[in-house]
Image: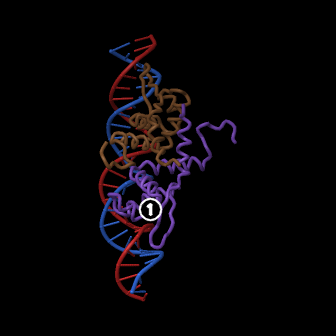
Chain colours: A brown, B purple, C red, D blue
Amino acid sequence: MRSGADLTEGTAEKLAALDAVVAALAHAARRQILMTIHFRGSASAGEIAGRFAHKWPTTTRHLRVLEDAGLVQQERKGRSRVYSVDKSRLALVSEWLGWFER
Amino acid sequence: MRSGADLTEGTAEKLAALDAVVAALAHAARRQILMTIHFRGSASAGEIAGRFAHKWPTTTRHLRVLEDAGLVQQERKGRSRVYSVDKSRLALVSEWLGWFER
DNA sequence: CTGATATTTAGCTCATTCGCTAAATGATGC
DNA sequence: GCATCATTTAGCGAATGAGCTAAATATCAG
């Protein structure tokens, strides 16, 4: 640990991860997608795309953003891709919010 | 309460507020600004602007975004404006994260 | 009132993001 | 292999966002 490190600073990797996560959560559609997958346990791209007003390719890209942020994982199951939520990355946000507690 | 309401849904106002808050937090500079104000208790626009690489007007606009999201409050003190953090809006984020708990 | 200080507002440019449609990929069934 | 189904990738146009400089506003000191 570097001496004199700013309290508000984490490791560079963590900062980058937080940034990606918060940016991914910044779009309402992506928050909804995350919720949808979470409450269903998992869902195929088609099931997700079917629930939203946007066209499928648009949803696909939202999924990509969520995946790049580490918020969802993908698994090929035959010709469909099944997505599930990786909650651990959400902890980065809680952790950041923790600085403001009390 | 409307029957059959989606669990992932809140009131329209709350959703809009959450959206503004998350969007405001999506920018690293704004997160840093929020931290800076929080740990100092309060800070004038000049004190804040002085700590960041960006030009003052850029920081001013970030402050505006934070204020519009209800994350900071402003008070005129002579010719300076003193900002302080309003933590209550951050609770919206924690609340949203709560859907994913356990 | 005049000048200085603190901060915001206006307006511009560049980059990114979001939606779309059309085309490409990859797996399955015959 | 050929057709089909599920999904992604490519690429475009419009909208938004972030940075900047220059000008405006507001308060205080004399």
Which class describes the residues within 10 Å of circle 1: few (<14), some (14-19), or many (20+)?
many
Residue identifier under label 1:
B43
In-front residue for pair D13/B86: B86
User: What type is the residue that disc 1 sits on?
Assistant: Ala
**Quadrant hosting residue C27:** top left
Q: Quadrant of residue C22?
A: top left
Q: Quadrant of the C terminus of chain B?
A: top right
Residue B89, image x and y in percent?
54, 51
Instruction: Work out whether residue D21 or residue A16 is closer to the camera in this orientation and state it.
Output: A16
Vertical order, B20 against A62 (above or below): below
Residue A36 in the image: state x and y as whole percent.
54, 33
Residue occupying the point 55% across, 38% down: B98
Q: Is residue A55 above or below residue D27?
A: above
Q: The N terminus of chain B lies in which quarter of the figure?
A: top right
Identify the chain of the residue marked 1, using the numbered disc in the image.
B
The residue under the point 56% across, 36% down is: B99
Residue placed furthest toward the front = A3
- Which residue lies at the image location 41% right of the left edge and 50% below the top edge? B27
